Image: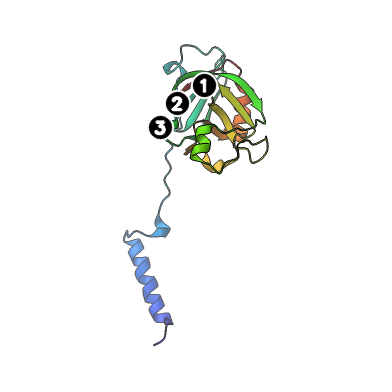
Amino acid sequence: MSSLISRRNFGKSLGAGLGFALLGGNSVLAQKRLRNISGFRYEVWEDYFNDLKHGAILADTKNRVLHYWSEDESIYHLFPVSVPLTPELTRVGYTEVINKKENPSWTPTQDMLRRNPDWPTYMPPGPDNPMGTHALYLSWQYYRIHGTHDTRKIGRRASQGCIGLYNEDIATLFDLAEVGTQVLLV
């Protein structure tokens, strides 16, 4: 018995497969890739803040986006972000930017090390640093808005509690936000 297929049988198989696809069959080649962009839209700051003194940042963990409004309303940015892996790691509410660091170092918390014992206890600034190129330190201990070296995380539940942005986006936000900028995580 031969394991080779004849040209005639190959043609019949090909024709049958093509007919199936044309009649509405599920074909891998015909699949359409869908993206959820419903949350990636402008928000009205008045729904979240009383004023824009020092500017405002809204980090929307459900839609995985961050909104920034300048104090004089002349600047508005919308950035895709990574958000905490689980609700237990997610802190919500009002806070503010209390410090800004370019090329931050990273020291994981004791809880992070318990969950990930193979992680280093300290990482200096550099291309492999999970804090990326810039960080905004919030008034909540251990919580940051920062860049990331791992761009696969953006748009996903991927962080240990912080809000992560592409390094290019955190550089933009870093230049705009000031110490005292109000922040709301929802």
Give the residue at x 37% y 66%.
18
Q: Nearer the viewer, residue 118 or 133?
A: 118
Q: Please name the amino acid that badge 3 sits on.
A: Pro
Question: Which quarter of the rendered picture does the N terminus lie within?
Answer: bottom left
Q: Is residue 129 left or right of residue 20?
A: right
Tell me which label, 1 or 2, sits earlier in the chain: 2
Q: Position of residue 162 (x, y in %)?
A: 52, 30
Q: Please name the amino acid that badge 2 sits on.
A: Arg
Quadrant of the image occupied by residue 171: top right
Q: Position of residue 112 (x, y in %)?
A: 51, 35
Please rate how many residues cluster around mark 3, counting C-alpha atoms within 10 Å: few if below 14, some from 14 to 19, many from 20: few
Please rate how many residues cluster around mark 2, counting C-alpha atoms within 10 Å: few if below 14, some from 14 to 19, many from 20: some
In this picture, is 23 found above or below 67? below
What residue does disc 3 label?
A: 87
In this picture, is 65 found above or below 73? below
Instruction: Kindly indicate whether the residue at mark 2 contacts the one at mark 1 (C-beta within 8 angstroms).
Output: yes
Please rate how many residues cluster around mark 1, counting C-alpha atoms within 10 Å: few if below 14, some from 14 to 19, many from 20: few
Q: Is residue 39 left or right of residue 162?
A: left
* Label 3: which secondary element: helix
What residue does disc 1 label?
A: 140
* Label 2: which secondary element: loop
- Separation of marks 3 and 1 at Cα, in angstroms: 16 Å
What residue does disc 2 label?
A: 91
Tell me which label, 3 or 1, sits earlier in the chain: 3
- Examine the rendering and report whether any part of residue 62 can be seen: no
* Label 1: which secondary element: loop
Give the residue at x 42% y 81%.
5
